[in-house]
Image: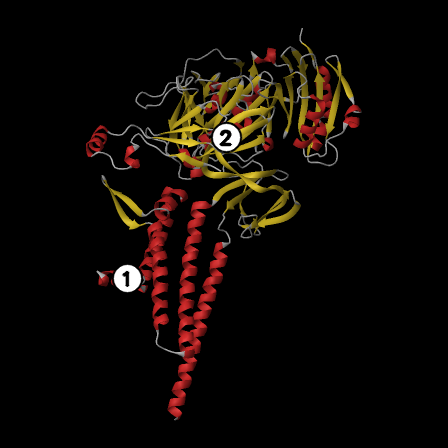
Amino acid sequence: MRRLLTSSIAVLGSLRLSVALFGLLTLITWAGTIAQETIGLQQAQREYFESWLVFRRAGDLVLPVLPGGMSLITALFVNLLVGGLLRLLPRLRARAHGRARGLRLASGCGVAITHLGIAALLLACLAKYRLAEEGGIQLFEGQSTSEFVSYEDWEIVVHERIEAGLLREHLVPSAAFADRQDGRSLRLRAPGLPFELLVSDFAPHAEVRRGPAPPGSGLPTVDGFHLRPLAPQTEWERNVAGCLVRVLRGPDAEPEPGILWGLAQHPLAVAVDGRSFGIGLRRQRSPLPFRLQLDSFTHRTWPNTTIPREFASEVTLLDEGGTERRQIRMNEPLRRDGVVVYQASFGPAAGDPGGPRFSGLSVVRNPADAWPWYTLYAIATGMLLHFVARMALFVRDQRRALRGRST
Amino acid sequence: LTTVAASGSACPRARRGPVRPGLAVLAVLAGCAPERREFEIRAVRERVVQGLRLDADSEERFGLSAGEASAGDAASPSFAYALPEGWTRVPAGAMRDLDLRTAGGVEVWVAKLAGDGGGAAANLDRWRLQFGLAPAAPGAVDALPRQPLLDGSAYRVDLRSGDGAGRLVGLMLFRPAGAVFVRMSGPPELVERELPPFARFVASLQDIVGAATASHASGRAGLHWTAPPSWFSLTPGPERIAHFRVAAEVEASVTVLGGDGGGLAANVARWCSQVGREPPPGPAELAALPRLEVLGVAAPLVDLTGDGARRGMLALYCPLEGRSVFLKIEGPSDRVRAAREDFVAFCLSLAPRD
């Protein structure tokens, strides 16, 4: 048993396992990149990099064909920690004395710090994957915004009118209802809301059609309209989500069905005791810690070509502390208050040749944004410690050898 | 801010601990009822939102954005027109007043809807969605080229589908008598060939029914007004009895509230905060506001377009017996200033309905 444990630990921390994992990571990176062509960026990301196993269909069978990014990164994380420990322990137990012991210990610590640094870098990736919010902003010159809109996530909003023009919004993130399909439902309630909601039949891409729902679809017809789920588009940001909702005014009241759709012009109206409510489905909006105003947008191409040479946005950031003018360029994002704003695109888009020009900015709010910097410092420190200690040991051994020869 | 408050299923005992084997077998054999989860909404935000209606019915919510189910019977056309050579009329689809096909099979239709038919931005997005394009950027509508249609100036849309297999040329006209949509779509080369006859068809189009009601004079809630001809009528709401697009990013409205509607000082303070103008004027400044004789009262006119601020507003407050009428125009300061004369004329046109 002890031998099995020892050999398992040796395998987990072995260099061979590291090489095998890097090889597999290269393989799924290649396969995932190729797959983007057919299944789109987000789906490829989900199937190859955010999964434990990559599955492929063979006839009626669905078989795992490759380990997914999650399992490979987890294995690499364990490999780094165990490997670092295995390389440090012999140095701690070494019988050398004096300066040599100190140098070997320093070398082992350097290796351990380097391993821990790389493992922390992987943790930073995990933190970004789990915690980061991503979205976009499109602004014409002179326009400003204090929120960004998710590319793929939706939210259910219950609007309540407080006074003319002022609304209170109760927000439900997509994580709560995006899997409510195939008969599964979500019951929503909120303090202060005089009704509850039952959300079901969420479709990431759907349209609303006039007329009765096709027989057998299992979907209701509401006021002469019905929801028709569509196959999701390859580029997820083009999807328009839809779902069904039932308003429950009380335990004995009959549920009132409604359709929520991403392109509906107005929310589903609900009036209770003289209070007006609206229930809508829209792309998830996240607040920015400042107001961002596009002052001007510059787009230059290389002479006699349409190849972009530079596109940049001159922006003003407004918050309680005052205003600040900044420039966002290709590969030179704006970083402030935990938010990174990249220059992502500009308009008009293809298919809209006569349309107005706008600046497209990509926004990432990542609480772990600075972690890679810290881990890189740790890795550099560990490697420096290891190399200096090894160099000192080498010089010491050389001197001893020379001394031995001379005597 | 938000958490999943409770996670449950129709087989909750399976989560709570050991269950009797017999019951477990029965549950598996019977199959679980559809899973139901519960969620308590805790994320709450307050925001100023203009134009969102909480009383719209399904027709107004989806309107033309919904796909048509099937072609219906040919309805009596509301339009007179000159049919280009080679074009034929076919039974009109749902929500369409006129459905035509060119010799090459290109689809052309005309639809007239009450109100703003969902609005320009929504209809542009709907057309873009149908052509596999992402929704238009904010403000894209304001930058669309314009083309004469009937008695107004319509937005002209020209889209090519993402895969290059289709092209759409469409017109959207918004006026007090309702919105009119004209659309031609088909393979790009055929649409290109049909552009000259399409232009002739559009020029020949006459609204037989709408012409009689195309005046900008209108009324609601016992009031009557005449809007400037250049203003587009938008869908009003329960309190906002009239709503207009004046220019790009500039909108005007008439709102009726019960009682004194919060009073002049409180409303002016709120307007100041909406356009980023602090502090609000004091009692002396409020007393010195210029006044317009509207609905029999000397109504104060609030001008928040100065001081070089980006957002601006002109507002007229008419306290009447038992209710108050607010007339507002809001948008970029320079554009609101440019529309001041029209706004004042609009205010002065307000009268009790006979």
Q: Where is residue A114 in the image (x, y as percent from the top left)?
A: 42, 64
Picture quadrant where residue A95 is located:
bottom left
Q: What element carries label 1?
A: helix
Q: Nearer the viewer, residue A44 or A121?
A: A121
Q: Nearer the viewer, residue A96 or B188?
A: A96
Q: Do labels 1 and 2 share a chain?
A: yes
Q: Nearer the viewer, residue A289 or A150?
A: A289
Q: Is residue A126 above or below residue B50?
A: below
Mark 1 and mark 2: span between their CA atoms? 52 Å
Q: What element carries label 2?
A: strand
Tell me the tag on residue A11.
Answer: 1
Q: Residues within 10 Å of mark 1 (few under 14, many from 20)?
A: some
Q: In this view, does A406 lie above or below B210?
A: below
Residue positioned 27% across, 49% down in the render: A65
Q: What residue type is labelled 2?
A: His
Q: Which amino acid does label 1 sit on?
A: Val
Picture quadrant where residue A294 is located:
top right
Residue positioned 37% across, 67% down in the render: A88
Query: Can see residue B323?
Result: yes
User: Hey, which residue is sitting farthest bottom in the picture?
Assistant: A407
State the colouring used for the structure image: secondary structure
Q: Position of residue B39 (x, y in %)?
A: 42, 32
Picture quadrant where residue A73 is located:
bottom left
Which chain is home to disc 1?
A
Q: Mark 2 points at which residue?
A: A170
Which chain is home to disc 2?
A
Residue positioned 75% across, 12% down in the render: B296
Q: Position of residue B330 (x, y in %)?
A: 66, 28
Split into 4 quadrants, where in the image is the C terminus of chain B?
A: top right
